[in-house]
Every structure is written in structure tokens, then in C-alpha cells.
Amino acid sequence: MRNVLNLIKINFVSIFKGMFGFNKKRKGASFLATAIIFLALLYFAFGSIMNTFGELLNEFGRVEYIIFIGSLFSFVFVLFFITYEAQSYFFKTKDFELLSSLPIKNHEIVIAKYSSVLLSAYLYSSIILFPTFVVYFMYAPFNFGTLLLFILGFIFAPLVPMALGTVLGLVISLITSKLKHSNIISIILFMLLLVAYFVLYYQMDSFINLVVQSGDSFLGGMQYYLPSIVWFYTGFALGDILYIFLFIILGLVVTALSVVMLSLLYKKINFNLLKKVAVKSKGELKFNKKSQVGSFLKLEAKRYFGYPAYVLNTAFSLIFMILFPFLIRYGMFGGILEAGEEALIPIISIITISLNVMFVCMCVTTSSSISIEGKQITILKSLPLKASKIFFTKTLFNNLLVLPFILISGIINIILFYNIFNVFLCIMIFLVPTIAIISFSTFGLLINLLLPKFNFDNINQVVKQSLSLFIVLMSGILISVIPMVIGLMTNINIYLYSAILISIYLIIFLVSFIILKIKGDSLYYKLKV
Amino acid sequence: MLEVKNLTKRYGSKLAVSDVSLKVEAGQITAFIGHNGAGKTTTLKAIAGIIDFDEGEIYVDGKSVRENSYKAKFDIGYLPDNPDLYETLKGIEYLNFIADVFYVDETVRKERIETYGRRLQIFSDLNSPISTYSHGMKQKLAILSLLVHKPKLYLFDEPFVGLDPVTSHEFKEIMKEVCLEGSAILFSTHVLEVAEKLCTHVIIIKNGKIMGQGEMKKVKGNKSLESLFLELEKSE
């Protein structure tokens, strides 16, 4: 027990000091403030989504089903993120060999690491469940007993998806580690999971109608496939003590089984994963010469695609950019457009351009590309590579990554809304996001230069938990969403709206560029591990 | 080749290197020895242009590292004490990257990689990802990456750590060869026997200050380098 507590303490200290920095109170306070604002935005966003379901369910007088919907979303959300995150906590970690050499039992190590992952699971679960509970009480009378039940439910809600996600992550790790292009396969697998999650969301309206019409008989059938979700609803929403008990027992049993399984396999799997079989390529060595920029660009690309977490964290928004036109066309405004509602044209235009801009600004690889150099920054700084060239190449890579998606999304939008978008809008669909990514890739680089993070144990601490990433991500969301909301409320002219957006991004670009021009060199040379 | 004048570097209130002046001429192999935390790595990093410094000047082949670090770096090859290389690359990709940065022609880089790669016994592993390399293999690759562009000044920080005896011997031979070709080497080491046999000159640093420097024979006299070092460590 003593070892478990010590390891948990070390893990949490490592996580929080990694986030907040060592002895940097101001940086820690900034990080905390940014994280809180970011979380608040997420809660608000999911709250809005749950509210649309809540309104619909309230019309049918079945608002309690929102708990079922929230529980389902939370289950899938936690399952998805824990699947790809858990691997980096349990497998191929830097502390594996150190811990293995100490007189600490496997299950003690696993329980300590499990607690770190559980922290993430609670965070993801809260993003869905807290807004769900709020929406429930917006339409149902407030009851303190019900609130206490929800809190109790929340405590045990992430256990099952977390256990499943950890096991699924392990299986994916084992399979992909034996394959030649394991990183690419991991990336594709998780992208497919993301698309599946998106499709599930897209089908929610039909699903809700089915739930409302079939009612309890539907849930009765569902409990054979998703028992934890049905039991959560039946226990904590309807107050059935038996199902509360069953839900808690299920969570604890699944967790215990998962911990036992991981404990038995922990060392064996890590040893297998650590077996670095040198893959000797057939064929001759290539000695092709490139320019400094070309060579560095190749290095950036290899590094980016070499870390699935880096890819997934930045590229998921690009996938959304491809899929959202379909959601807008057939989901949000399906049927209405066929009726020829001309008043919707400016609304669709504003939403389309704003969302595309938001999505590209969520794929700013430069916000962590300085940090991700890690200890290699020493080598980089010893080379005759001008700082300006390094900055240029990093922003160029970001832009080259995003531009094809802008092109594809633009073409899809034009095809889907060919009867709505005039020539000007068709140009804006491409131009505004392009200017946005050029602007934000520069801005992201500046922020990362000001707030680098080189000491990390695993890549997630940089691509998911760094202050520079939070600032850039939040800025990207706010700068696209706030004008969109104002534009929709004021019924702004689309030409003026496009001009305003372009101006905002050009200003951001110019300011970032000028600061980099004046201060970039000195900021770069001050970087140290 | 290398001239350091009154170099001073502080980390907060701590004086890491204080008023250090040293010279390394072309053709010299100079050992840079001192206790842990004496300031060896700080000095080497300042010369390599990796860290800035508070006072003093550093010239590499006449070029100021402070004023013109970009041009000076073309003449410098720096080997860190722990070669944290780009693990997502293969060995050959890393070498090509370094060669591209230093504008080394294809024919020249091919010849150097083949020649030195075989001598360091890393050539057959160059098509493998660096993530599969052991520490010693990474060290060999890092050394090879310097030999690809053949700088005028080599800066090695603990270069023999992790090298097997055969490679270690071959590396010493290569060091002598490059110095005969006109380059200069400054390397830090704790292995005093190697320094004594290999080096023409020695610099001893203690608590950020130079305690002695010059030709190996003159500095150590009749004593062994180890005895001299221990004496200096005990003195105030």
C-alpha cells in the first residue's frame, strides 16, 4: 500500500509540475487560468448540444432520457480518448526499466498508473455529464436527492469505459507494434473511431426518436449490449436502488479485472514492446541532397507522423472540416434548404466560413513544434541553421498540412451548396481559412517560443497539456466563434463579415510576424532544456 | 582556431564559468578535464553557440560566436554528452539532414559516410530507425554526423561513453587523422588515461575557473595526469 501511495504521489506531482512548470508560479497561474477558461468553453459547447436534445425530449415529456443520452455520450467519449491515451501511461514509458529494477510489485505499479489515467477519464466524463445534469435540471424540478444521486453516479461512471479503453488500447498497441507502419495504422484506426463517433452523433436525432417512441422496451433490449449505460440511467435517473448497486458493482468488478489483467501482462507486454528489432531495409542507402529548408521540412514531417498522439490531437479538426458540410446540409438545415428559404443563405454562409476557420485554427502544429524538439534542441541550436529558416519551415509544414483539407472541404461545400453560394462566397470558402492558417501558424510559433516546454516524459504532455497549446487553441476558437455569434445576431452582410474576418487574421499575422522578426532570434537562442 | 577570452556565464546567482580564457590551435587535440559541475559542458556549449554568455568573447577561426554565430557554426562540430537524436528518422536520414544543413555534396557525403561508417561499425545499421539503436550506436551515429561535414573545430563532450573498445580505438585514430588534416579538437573526459595518451594539450577547470592549461608534457611534468588532477582538486 505504501508503494502504491508513493507512486501515485510521484505520478501526480509529475503530471501537475509538468503542466504548471517547476517553481514558476506565474506560469502555473497562467496555465490554470487558461485551462479553466478552456474547460468552461467545452462545458458550454457540450451543454448547448445536450440542451438541443433536452428541448426535444421535453416536448415528449421524457426529459429523464437526457441522462441516458448523456451517459451514452460520456461512455463513448471516455472510451475513445482513454483508448489512445492509456497506452502512453502503461506501455513504452520512460520509467518502466527503473520501476522494474525496484522491489515494487506489478499490481502496485499498475494501480498507481491507473489512478493517473482515471484522472483523465473523470475529466472527459465531466465534460459530458456535468452539462447533462445541468440540462436535466433546466427542464425537471430541482431535487437535492437527485443531485446527490447524479454525483454518486458520476463517481462510478468512467470506470467501465476506462477499463474497456485501457484493454482496447493494449490490444491495438500489441497488434500495431508488430506491423511495419505501426504509427500510420494507429493513426488511421483512431481516425476511423473518430469518424464513427461523429456518425453516431449525426444519427442522434433518429436515435432519440427511437428511444422516445419505444421507451422502456428499447432500453430493456439495450441493456444486453450496453448494460452500464442502461443501469446508470435506471439507477441514477429513475432512482432504482438495485440498478445503482448493480452499476457500482459492475464498475468495480470491471476495474478490478482490468487491473489484474494489466498486472499479469504489464512486464511481459512492455518487454515485448521494447524489443527493438532493427528493421533492415533492403536496397541501397540514399544520399540525396536537398536544400536546408527541404531537409528540415522532411524532418518535421517524419517527426509529426512518427507520433500518433501529435497527429490525432491536431488533425481531428481537419476531419471535422470534411464532415461538417454534410452535417450542415443534411442535418442542421436538411429539408429547409429544399424549400428554398433564402433567409438561410447568409446564416449558412457565416456558419460555414466561421467553422472552417475554427477547424483550421485547431490544427496549429506550430503551437507545440518548438517544445516537441525536446532535448534535440541542443543539436538544432549547434547547427548553422538560422532561426528564421527554422521558423519558416515549421510554419510552412503546418500550412502544407492544412491546405489540402481546406481545398477538399471547399470543394465539398461548393458541391453541397452549389445553389446557395455565389462566386464571392466560393472564393471566401478557400481564402478565409487559408489566411487564418497562415496567420495562426505564425501566431502559434510565437506563443510556443515564449512558452516552450522541453522537459516531458511522454509526448502527450506536450501535445495535450502544454500552456502554449491551450492558448493557441482557445484563441482560435474564440476568434472564430465570437464573430460568428455576433454576425448571426446582427444579421451582418456576408461581404462585410468576410472582410472583417480577413482583417482580424491579417492583423494577427502581421503582429506575430513583426514580433518574430524583431525578437525571434533572441527568443530562439534563449531556449534551453 | 579557437580563442576564448574572459568567458563568464551565470545561471541565476550561480557562476557556472568565470573569466575563462583558452586557446586551441589547428592540429591540437586538447583534453578538457574537471570535476562534475566544474563548467566543462557550459564552456563547450557556449563555444558551440548553443547557450549565450554574459561576458567575454569566443572566436572560431576568427569568427565571433557572439556576433556571427551562424557563420561560426559552419566550422564547428559539436557532440553532446548524451546524443538525443531524432528517433523518428533512420540513421541515414539523420546523416543526410546534417549534410544538407552543411551543404555537403552528394558524392562527398557518400564517400565520408561509407568510409567512416564502416570504420565506426555503424554503416550496416544506417537504414534502421534511430529508435532501435542502443546508446553506443547513437553515439557512433552522432560522431559520424560530425565527420560528414568535417568541421575545423570539433567539440566533444564525453565522447568515449558507450563506445566499445574496437570503436573507441578507431575513433582515437580518426581524431589523430583529422588533426593532421588541420582541424582542432577540444574534448571533455573523465578518462584521464585516454587524455594522457591521446592529447597534445590539456586544460583543467575547477569551479568554473581555469586551473592550468598548455602542452600535456609541460602541464603534468613527471606526474601522471591523475595525480596532478587530484592535487589541484585538493588545493584551494
Image (tube, rainbow, N blue to C red):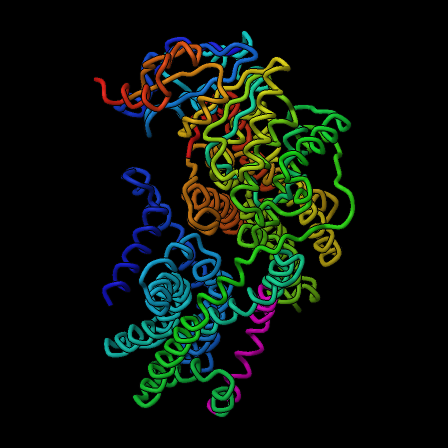
Up-down relation of residue A216 to residue A128 (above or below): below
Quadrant occupied by the C terminus of chain A: top left
- Image-quadrant location for residue B233: top left
Residue A70 seen in the figure: no
On the picture, is A135 further left or further right than B166?
left
Quadrant occupied by the N terminus of chain A: bottom left
- Tell me the residue at 61%/52% (across/down): A318
Residue A51 within the segment the image draws in magenta: no
Residue A208 within the segment the image draws in magenta: yes
- Image-quadrant location for residue B85: top right
- Tell me the residue at 53%/63% (across/down): A272
Which of A158 and A114 lies nearest the eye of the viewer?
A: A114
Q: Where's residue A77, x and y in %? A: 48, 67
Q: What range is drawn magenta here? A: A193-216
- Magenta part, dominant SS: helix
On the picture, is A336 further left or further right than B203?
right
- Tell me the residue at 51%/35% (across/down): A445
Q: Where's residue A20, x and y in %? A: 33, 44
In the image, farthest residue toward the front? B222
Which of A329 and A408 lies nearest the eye of the viewer?
A: A408
Residue A272 seen in the figure: yes
Up-down relation of residue B222 to residue A246 (above or below): above
Which of B228 and A116 lies nearest the eye of the viewer?
A: B228
